[in-house]
Amino acid sequence: MTIALLQKQHEQIHEIIQELLHVPQEKLEEKAFDISMKIGQLAGVLLFHLQSEDKFLYPNLMEHENSHIRSTAVAFTEEMGNLGEKFSAFKAKYMQPKNIKANPEKFRQDLGEIVAELKNRIEREEMELYPLLGK
């Protein structure tokens, strides 16, 4: 597992997010099925990404001789649990097109919130966590 592969997964996540964000508000009901499929695609990429990190990245960082690296890895794993739960709830709700159609405004709001958290997480991983692997 290389950082390049993890970063490629980040790019895939970003691309799917952009596709979701670019659906015009007035088209949300019409495109609800396509949106739910994109959410499923995003969930798949995220799941693979998280499994990759859990299996290869975090075990190495948590056993590192440098205490700062170990504590950073622990903090990231603890934070991810909360974001993972939020995304799971989002996915469970909006993988059903009827829930998008029922309240497109709420979907857009929820999407904005989860996207902001995902983008923040990705940025922090790339700026704070991944550089630690070279140490």
Image (cartoon, helix red, strand yellow):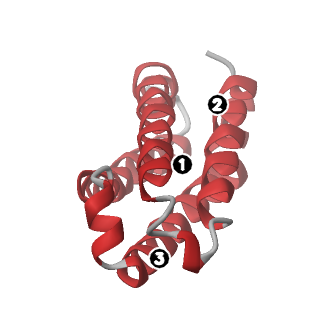
| Residue at 43% across, 59% down | 32
Is residue 89 or residue 3 the one in the foreground? 89
Q: Which mark is residue 108?
A: 3
Q: CA distance from mark 1 to mark 2?
A: 22 Å
| Residue at 48% across, 23% down | 52
- Disc 3 marks which amino acid? Arg
User: Height in image: 61 above or below 112?
Assistant: above
List the residue tagged with mark 1: 68
| Residue at 40% across, 54% down | 75
Q: Which mark is residue 6?
A: 2
Q: How crowded is the residue under tag 1: few (<14 C-alpha within 10 Å), some, or many (20+)?
A: few
Instruction: Locate the C terminus and report the quarter of the image it occupies.
Output: top right
Q: How crowded is the residue under tag 3: few (<14 C-alpha within 10 Å), some, or many (20+)?
A: some
Of tags 3 and 2, the one toward the viewer is 3
Residue 93: image location, x then y, percent: 24, 59
Q: Which mark is residue 107?
A: none
For residue 5, say whether it is visible: yes
Q: CA distance from mark 1 to mark 3?
A: 38 Å
- Disc 1 marks which amino acid? His
- Disc 2 marks which amino acid? Leu
Is residue 67 or residue 104 the one in the foreground? 104
Q: Earlier in the sequence, mark 1 or mark 3?
A: 1
